[in-house]
Image: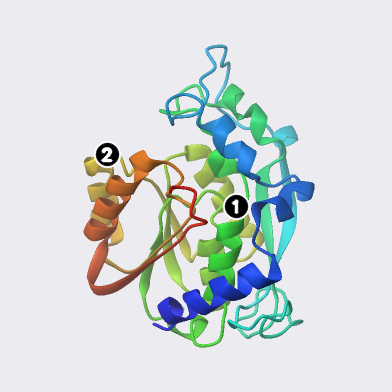
Amino acid sequence: MAALGLAAAVAAAARDQGRYDESHFEGDGLANEADIQASLSNGGKGAVNTDVVEDTLPEAELQTDELVLRPCSGESSPEGSGSGGGGSGRGGGELVLSLMHVRDPSVMHKYAKHQKTKCNLWARMWSSSSLLAEILIADGVREHLSDVSAIEIGAGMAVCALTAAVRGGAKIMVTDSSDHALDLVKGSARLNGVADSLSCSRMDWHSSSSVSGVAVQGGPYEFVIGSDVLFASMNVQPIVKAIIELLAPGGLAVVIDPGRLR
C-alpha cells in the first residue's frame, strides 16, 4: 500500500500547517496534552474513583458532532489535495464524519464500575487520529482499503476505522479496552451508514488471551492501524507483540504517534 510512503510526507506537511498540534483542538473541547497526565495519574492506569454508582452512559452525557477530514497529499498547502464533496461518498474531497461521543470525558469515572481501568483517554479526540484518517482518504491509499482485512487497535472514538469504512469501503474490526468506547463506535457507525462494515471487539493489549481472541475472530489482518497508542512506555512492548500476532504475513501496520515518549 501507498500509506507508508505517504505518511512521512504528510507528517512533514502537517508540521508546516500546524493542523495536528494537540492545542489546535483544545478550543473545541477535544484532547490536549494535559489530559494525558490527568488520565494516567494512577500508575499509568487512570484515576480510580471508589464512589462509582453505575455503568450505563445516560443520553445526557452524550452528544454528536461533525468532524471534517481533508485528504492528505504531502503538500504544504493547508487545503491538502482537495476540498468539497463531503459526506459518505467514496470519492475524493472532504469527508464529514458524524461522531457520537461523551460530552465531558472528566465524568467518565462515574460510569466505569466494572471497567478494569478507569482511564478516560478513549473518550477524547486525538489529533493523531485525524492525521491517520486523512492519510487513509488520500489518493493512492483509499482505493486499496476495500481489498484488505483491517483492524484498528486502541480505537477510542474509531475515527480511523470509520473513515476507512465510509470512504474506503473497508470491512474493519474495531478494538478498544473500553466497552463504553465500543458502544459509542457502534452508534457512530449507524450515524454514518456503515454499521454493517464495522465489527467491534473488546481487546486489552496487555492480555495475551484477549489479543489471541481477536486474532481468532477475524485475523490474521492484512492492515493494522493505531493512532496515539504509545502514550505510556508500558504499552510499547505489548502493542508490538499484539501487532505481530494480529498481522498477516506480508501485511502492513501503520501506527501514527506524536512522539510523547522520549
Q: Mark 1 and mark 2 in contact (Cβ < 8 Å)?
A: no
The amino acid type found where label 2 is placed reads Ser
Q: Secondary structure at mark 1?
A: loop
Q: Nearer the viewer, residue 184 or 119?
A: 119
Which color mode does the image show? rainbow
The circle on residue 126 is 1
Q: Is residue 124 above or below residue 109?
A: below
Badge 2 density bin: few <14, some 14–19, many ≥20, Cα 10 Å: few
Residue at image coords 26%, 64%? 247
Q: Is residue 37 visible?
A: yes
Q: Work out whether residue 166 can be spotted.
A: no
Q: Is residue 259 above or below residue 49?
A: below
The residue at 69%/59% (across/down) is: 98
Instruction: Tell me the distance, in whole angstroms, between the alpha carbons under discs 2 and 1.
Output: 24 Å
Name the residue that disc number 2 marks. 207
Sequence-earlier tag: 2 or 1:
1
From the viewer's side, name the closer residue of 188 and 75.
Answer: 75
* Residue 219, image quadrant: bottom left
- What is the three-letter code of the residue carrying label 1? Trp
| Position of residue 1 measured from the top left corner of the image (x, y, whole percent) | 39, 82
